[in-house]
Image (cartoon, rainbow, N blue to C red):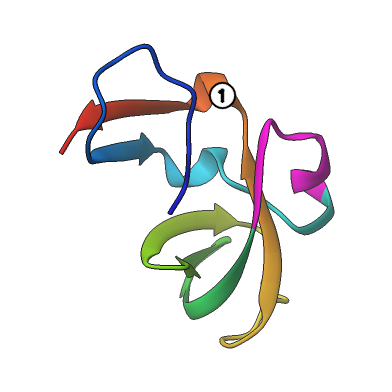
Amino acid sequence: MIAFASSGADGKVEVGLRPERVQLGAAAAGCAHRFTAQVADRMFLGAQVQYRLALGECHLVAHSADAGLAPGQDVEVGWNAADHWVVEA
């Protein structure tokens, strides 16, 4: 479960986040929201790598130029508050 400050009603929400806004590894250190995730899968997309990340029961996708993360590896992930949006589920 990921908690966010909100002035809205209690209940389930979904968080939207563009994959290129997710920071990985040391780049996540300065982000407002930081978590440890596990690399579930990676796919090479030319100059970019798409990582599918498991964050507890949540999943997110990140794009990076760094191809050094392997499936099963733990990685710090983060993003800034302005980079996500929250909607009721």
Query: Dot 1: what SS?
Result: helix
Q: Which residue appears farthest toward the top when viewing the image? A: 7
Q: Which residue appears farthest toward the left when viewing the image? A: 89
- Residue located 49% across and 23% down the image: 5
- Residue located 82% across and 44% down the image: 29
Name the quadrant containing residue 32: top right
Q: Position of residue 43 (x, y in %)?
A: 45, 76
Q: How many marks on residues?
A: 1
Q: Is residue 60 left or right of residue 68?
A: left
Residue 30: in magenta span: yes
User: Does the rendering let one see residue 66?
Assistant: no
Which quarter of the rendering shows the C terminus? top left
Q: Position of residue 56 (x, y in %)?
A: 46, 68
Amino acid bearing label 1: Ala
Name the quadrant containing residue 17: top left
- Residue located 66% across and 58% down the image: 65
Q: Which residue is mark 1?
A: 81
Q: Is residue 54 left or right of residue 23?
A: left
Residue closer to the observer: 12 or 52: 12
Q: Position of residue 35 (x, y in %)?
A: 64, 54
User: Mark 1 packing: few (<14 Cα in 10 Å), some, or many (20+)?
Assistant: few
Q: Position of residue 64 (x, y in %)?
A: 61, 56
Which quarter of the rendering shows the N terminus? bottom left
Residue closer to the observer: 56 or 61: 56
Residue closer to the observer: 1 or 53: 1
User: Does the rendering let one see residue 87?
Assistant: yes
Q: Is residue 44 left or right of residue 16?
A: right
Residue closer to the observer: 71 or 58: 58
Per the rendered image, the range of residues in magenta is 27-35
